[in-house]
Image (spheres, grey):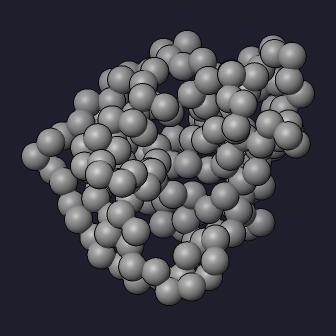
Amino acid sequence: VHVVTLRLFRCDGLLCAKVGEWCKADRQVRTVKAKLPGTKTLAGEMPRQALDRLIGKDLAAKNPQVDTGNIEVEVEEAPSESYGVATKYVRTIFTACVGPMGPASGPIDFFVEASDGEQSQRLEVFMARWPEEMPDGGSVYAWIPSQDFERLGKLESLSLSLGLTASMNLLTNEVMQI
């Protein structure tokens, strides 16, 4: 399986990690292990084309500047998340950065409290589009300190709680639960 991931840094050094999936049917965010934004490559698609598709779908509002001189390739054999069978993954990792983010840097930016059962921290979370604009669901990302990425990536899921500020920022027709 060929996948493309993006190691996206903000100018303050925080790393972008996928922390959930918006489920329109349940009208809530299902949390996942923290991982880099990524996508499988489609048949006949080159890694850079898959990266452009990922950015266009989820990260265009952040306007990432990709470092084309810093591309890594990793090969790993691990159980697939869907079927649990041994799978060979060829992962192309691109690195990019984004400039300073203002209060309205994307359609939905808000803060949540994240807990792994032992530690709790405030995370800045964003979605590419409003929930009603994502008929099939969509990714939820957070800006996290790089040193926390490995720890959060080992957890089955995070417990995210939506504060009053986030609720007010999500003035849509959808009811969102995290």
Residue ID at (46%, 43%): 16
How far from the left and from the top, in percent, is residue 36?
A: 45, 53
Residue ID at (33%, 30%): 64
Q: Is residue 165 visible?
A: no
Q: Is residue 60 visible?
A: yes
Q: Nearer the viewer, residue 102 or 141?
A: 141
Residue ID at (85%, 40%): 25
Judge left or right: residue 35 versus residue 55.
right
- Above or below: residue 87 compared with residue 29: below
- Above or below: residue 101 compared with residue 14: above
Residue ID at (81%, 15%): 172
Q: Nearer the viewer, residue 2 or 150?
A: 2
Judge left or right: residue 149 versus residue 111.
left
Which quadrant, please, contains the C terminus? top right
Q: Residue furthest bottom?
A: 86
How far from the left and from the top, in percent, is residue 136?
A: 70, 37
Q: Residue furthest front?
A: 44
Quarter of the image for residue 137 reads top right
How far from the left and from the top, in percent, is residue 39?
A: 45, 51
Q: How many marks?
A: 0
Judge left or right: residue 76 versus residue 122.
left
Which quadrant, please, contains the N terminus? bottom left
How far from the left and from the top, in percent, is residue 111?
A: 68, 32
Q: Nearer the viewer, residue 136 or 14?
A: 136
Judge left or right: residue 120 versus residue 50.
right
Quarter of the image for residue 101 reads top left
